Image (spheres, rainbow, N blue to C red):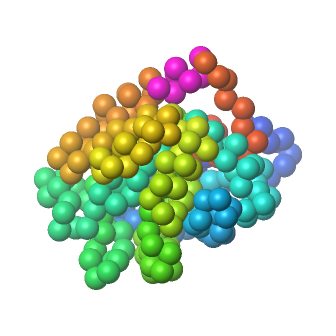
Amino acid sequence: MVDLTHIESEDESPDEPVQVFYVPDLRLVRQLAETASSVRERVFDLPESIPGVCLLNELAFSGLEGSGPQDFDLLAEGLKRCVEFDIFKTLVFPQRLADRSQEQICLARHRGELQVIHRKTAELLQNLSFRGFNFCAIFFIGKNNQQDYCRALSEASLLSLIPILFIVFDRESKAKLARRLDCIVAFDDQQQLITSYQRKGVRAVQVTRDFGLHTHSDEALTYISQLWEEHLQARPVSSSIGLKSALRLTRH
């Protein structure tokens, strides 16, 4: 059985039951599907202005009673000043393209290929949770392929690492959504999209297989922390949605 870390709210009364969000201990995980117990998935369509769908892990949020296009403004406000990641070749690689010198965690098969995440990248995402950062993934896929891709994401239990995934149906919507969320930084592997982010006024960093989140995870965490501090000094965070990943951590 996977040993788990749990996060408990400090805001709850001692007499009230505390809802616990379990975070998997990645030291014991070989396939991310082993963490499925820490995911309760909800899927809904994004507003017409940003064609796409959203997958979120209900267990990672508090104070969110409903979700859908009508509640998108509430969700976006809660994610203000988040860190944003692309998925393909930024967080997740087909196994044949992954860095073989790095330890990997298996995800699911998509289009006949096993997808993996480097363990260092997965640990970076958990470190962001432990330190209370808001973060999400925004990625493009054609509308006709979304059901197959969403199925692979669900099978992989990726929501145990990233609490919210936005799938948009056109490339330009990635930068548009990142701007709407006031992201402090976006990580992507494509130069074209880096330029698109920058045109929208979003700071963006290009990653590669050889110089990416898995090879320089400590540097990435330091960089994100510096940007976060700059934004905290400029604009204190106020959130309509409390991410449980920002709450107190306890081990058992």
Can residue 13 be spotted in the picture? Answer: yes
Residue situated in front as seen by the camera: 34 or 215: 215
Q: Position of residue 177 (x, y in %)?
A: 56, 50
> Relative to 70, is 56 on the left or the right?
left
Q: Decide whether the magenta segment is chiefly helix, strand or loop.
A: helix
The residue positioned 50% from the left and 34% from the top of the image is: 201
User: Quarter of the image holding residue 108?
Assistant: bottom left
Residue situated in front as seen by the camera: 245 or 201: 201
Residue situated in front as seen by the camera: 239 or 132: 239
**Farthest residue, direction front:** 199
Residue situated in front as seen by the camera: 67 or 125: 67
Q: Position of residue 101 (x, y in %)?
A: 13, 53
Q: Position of residue 178 (x, y in %)?
A: 53, 45
**Farthest residue, direction right:** 15
Residue 217 versus residue 189 in the image, above or below: above
The residue positioned 30% from the left and 42% from the top of the image is: 206
- In the rendered view of the protein, which quadrant contains the N terminus? bottom left
Q: Position of residue 168 (x, y in %)?
A: 52, 63
Can residue 33 be spotted in the picture? Answer: no
Report the number of discs.
0
Span colored in magenta = 227-233
> Relative to 170, is 103 on the left or the right?
left
The residue positioned 22% from the left and 55% from the top of the image is: 103
Residue 12 versus residue 71 in the image, above or below: above
Is residue 100 located in the magenta-colored stretch of the structure?
no
> Relative to 172, is 89 on the left or the right?
left
**Farthest residue, direction left:** 101
Is residue 229 located in the magenta-colored stretch of the structure?
yes
